Amino acid sequence: MALICGLAAGVAAIAFREAIFFVQNIWVRIPSESLVPWIHARPAWQIFIGPPIAGLLVGIILERISVRRPFGVADVIEVRASAKMRLSKADGAWSALATVISLGGGASAGREGPVVHLGATLATALVSKLNLPLWSRRTILAAGAASAISASFNAPIAGVLFAHEVILNHYSRRAFVPIVIASAAGSVLSRLWSGDAPAFNVPPLAVATYWEFPAFALLGIVCAIVAISFQFSLFAADYMARGVPMPLWMRPVIGGLIVGAIGVFYPEVLGVGYGTTDQALRSEIPIMTLLILLVLKIVATSVTLASRFGGGVFSPALYLGAVAGAAFGQIAASAVEIDASSTGLYAALGMGAVAGAVLGAPVSTALIVFELTGGYALSIALLLTVAVAYGVNHAFHGRSWFQWQLEGRGLNLRAGPHRDLATRTKVMDIMTMPEEDAESETVTDELKEWALRPIDTLETALRQFDMSGRSRLPVIDPNDGETIIAHLTQIRALSHFNRALISVSEEEHR
């Protein structure tokens, strides 16, 4: 099953990437992820019209056909945390189409998050008719995500670790083998299609002197500031966009006009941005341009995602990290009198540091940078920089961007599985219904203040038991507030809670 799902997700990731090239070729006649430097030769009007036209098409899809927004990694994590484990195939397909149009039309976002959602959707759809246990369905979900990452980045090891670190949120021995099989399948398909070269063509990278390690730690702090600023910008832009009353279809159009206007002057911010990232790694961008792109990319990506374009934050985080690292490297080289490492090395370190902090995935992000650049010689410096950036980011607000998105939907996974179980389980899921021939009862005045409703959470029920001192409480009809429709005992509530916690513990340790 993991092999089949991995192959399906790998094919989907390749098709997704080629579809973006197709749309982009219609727009600016550049069938490649690297818009730079060819887009500079295009007329300003052609650059400008791409994002708003793409926004109009995306707005029509969101308004008339699909859901209210495209999907990404946070939606896969939300489904993994749910016992229902359902990802709509139709919504996933329309979301993928909206993202293809968005990125092919110049929207400033990444393709990896939507690809993860597409791969997970296909994987769960292929096994939906099978009577699999919950832990097995979660493993297949993570396997689809791993294959999508592996095929998208040509990074099989990083795909495996990303599935464990971000999707499953734990390392399980029995989940390891199927996820590896799926990730390997996706990587093989990607290499058969596009070759086995790293995603970025950079010269060999190596640390010039160990005296630079304090600079690497300082770079980690700088990258943490960039990551924090990026996340706050994303959140603020989304908050402001929600407060502006306008039709849903118009949001991507307005956002496209803003992004297109930025792109006329700095087309490097448009699209996935791999071309500019590659230039930063090769030390081809001057310092002032790097600093300007750092600000404009944050603005363009925030506007893009707040406007309901399809896309993710993975590629923008790599872009911002490479640009920030290259700028830091140039400044450091001019400030000290030692033979410093190349600017490309600092750009690679910055990639891992910013992405690791934003995604909340320091280990898999470090592996992605290794596999994207082929630069294993920088491993010690990269791990130090990523660790410092992740630590500062976590100390500042304690969450990744995905966790921030989920908390906005009322799902707090940072508090642990017990919190999630207590808030997701409803009284209606565990209450005891009366016999069919039993007479209807009405709640007494004594019990009315402690009575439960079917939509109350398990957390509310346990609090009511504790405060009332009773071991059995009535569940009343929410429509009239008087009729007792069921009962719930404290023993039943605690037993359900304990069984669920044991199940989670077994899944994470087997």
Image (tube, rainbow, N blue to C red):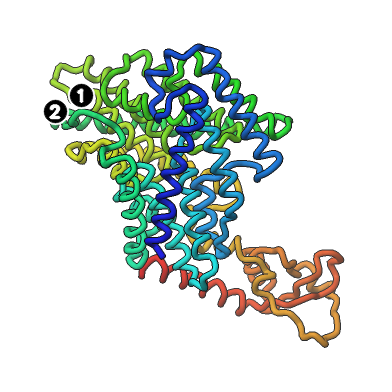
The foreground one among 423 and 262 is: 262
* Of the image marks 2 and 1, the number of the one nearer the N terminus: 2
Kindly tell me whether residue 396 is visible in this rendering: no
Above or below, comparing residue 228 to residue 413 in the picture: above
Residue 507 figure quarter: bottom left
Q: Please give the residue where the numbered disc 2 appears in the rendered image.
A: 208
Residue drawn at x 23%, y 38% is 374
Residue drawn at x 26%, y 18% is 330
The foreground one among 457 and 119 is: 119
Q: Is residue 469 left or right of residue 178?
A: right
Residue drawn at x 47%, y 21% is 296
Q: Position of residue 332 (x, y in %)?
A: 24, 20
Amino acid type at image mark 2: Ala
Helix, strand or loop at label 2? It is loop
Q: Given contact means CB atoms under 8 Å apart, are the residues at marks 2 and 1 in contact?
A: yes
Q: Please give the residue where the numbered disc 1 appears in the rendered image.
A: 342
Q: Position of residue 46 (x, y in %)?
A: 53, 16
